[in-house]
Structures are given as C-alpha cells and as structure tokens.
Image: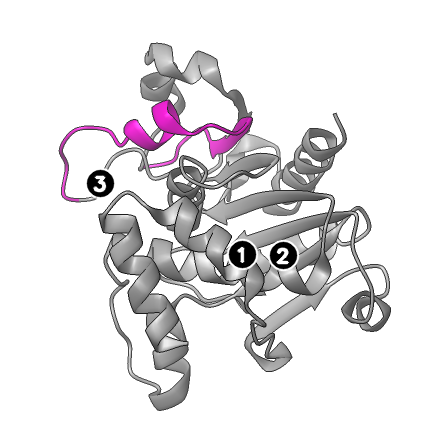
Amino acid sequence: MSCLLDNLKQAYLDGELAAAVAALKSEDLLFDVSQYLVDAANAEETLRSHSDTLIVLAHGAGANMQHEFMTVMAKGLSSSATVVRFNFPYMRANAIDGKRRPPDRAPKLLADYALQLAILSQQFKPKKIYLVGKSMGGRMSAILAESLSVDGVICLGYPFIPLSGGEPRLEPIEKCLAPMMVIQGERDKFGHKGLVETWPIMKKVQLHWLTDGDHSFKPRKSSGTTLEANLAETVALIKAFIVQ
C-alpha cells in the first residue's frame, strides 16, 4: 500500500492523478475492513453486495474517524447511503503508537484519499459517490474533485481562513468540478457568516448556515438552539443534497 501511495502522490504532483487512479481499476485492491468504519441500513449485507450510493466521510485535522461528530454524521446518513469512514495516514500512525502527529501535507493526504476512493469503489461498486468531509477533510474532498469524478462534495465547516491568517482558501471551491455544498456555523472562526457571504465565488455552491454554530456547529446556550439540533439539520441537508 505504501508503494501505491507514493505513486499516487507523485502522480498528483505531476498533475496525473486521474490517470493513475484509472489505472488502478485493473488491479485487485485489498479492502481491509479493519481499517474502516462502515455504516448502512444493513452493514454486514452491504459488505457482501453493491451499494447504490456511497458516502466517503473524511475526518478533520485534529479528530479521527471515531470522533463523536463523525459517528453522529455516519449513523444519521446510513439510512440513505452506505457511509464509510477511514483515517488519513497520520491518524493511522497515531492509532498504532499513541503519539499525536500533525496532519500530513496535502499531496500525501490527497494521494491517500484517492487510494481509499479506488479501494471503496472496487469494493462497493456504487452508482453514485459523494465525498463528505469535516474541515480539513472537506477541503481535501473539494481538491480531489478537481481531478476525480464524483457526484458531489459536501464540506462541513470549511476551513476558509488558516489559523495563522492569510488569504482565504477559495481555490479548491473555484476548481471543484462536482456539485458542492458547504454547511457552516454562523460563528465559525475559520469563516463566519459576515465574511463568507461577501465572496462572489460562494454563489457557485449551496451554502447553508447553522444557527450560532462554531466550527463544531455548537451554538451558545443563549442562542435558543442546541448542538443536537444543528447536527440533525446537517444530516437532513446532506440527505436532501444526495437525492436531488
């Protein structure tokens, strides 16, 4: 797998990721079920058969696929699609030795994401594929959809503004070739409502705001709403997006 990952990383850097992924279709890729979390109406049956709709759910920078947010999303969406979670390489390494590592650089993340997508496509043979990502995972999903064909990209808390400051990360949105939806908390420090709505490029996407939500979609007690309500709204918005 490391050799495949290195090859895909170089292919991404050379602008040849789509061709490299297409070449994998002729290979017998290993689906190690222990490396994934699969949620579906009947997960065991799904593993032995095909899926009409596959949602690949990518985690954010600081929390792995088992995080409560990821679990709530996967369970909520499992009635409408097969939902598969995976860990990016640095999180897989963290799970082995317990050490905390920063995220890998984008080329490695994207190479791994592309490999996971190839493996899952071969395993489930879906008719439709949607990439759903939290924060960093959403940004990687948008970038990947510039090269690979998917039916939609959904970003949950898109990290528009780096914590270190600088220009907003709008290029992945500009170049994303798939239909796209962004679900954002109104108070998100990585891109709040008053700022994001001033960018013309956002007219390209379906943009939805969660009442008083922060980057985790959590509102203040004084807002009159709850985290549970915002998460339920998120699930409903995603379900509506994938059936439109």
Q: Is residue 8 left or right of residue 167?
A: right
Q: Nearer the viewer, residue 59 or 33?
A: 33
| Quadrant of residue 99 within the rendered picture | bottom left
The picture places residue 143, in percent across and down from the top left corner, at 37, 40
Tag in front: 3 or 2: 2
Tag 3's secondary structure? Answer: loop
Q: Is residue 34 above or below residue 71?
A: below
The numbered mark, 3 or 2, whose residue comes first in the sequence reads 2
The picture places residue 122, in percent across and down from the top left corner, at 64, 61
Report the amino acid beneath label 3: Pro
Q: Which residue is mark 2?
A: 121
Viewer can see residue 141? yes
The residue lying at 50 percent from left, 42 percent from top is 217
Q: Nearer the viewer, residue 174 or 216?
A: 174
The picture places residue 83, in percent across and down from the top left corner, at 68, 56
Q: Is 177 covered by the magenta stretch? A: yes
Magenta region: 164-189
Tag 2's secondary structure? Answer: helix
The answer to whether mark 1 and mark 2 are in CB contact below 8 A is yes
Q: Is 179 covered by the magenta stretch? A: yes
Q: Which residue is mark 3?
A: 162
Which numbered marker is on residue 117?
A: 1
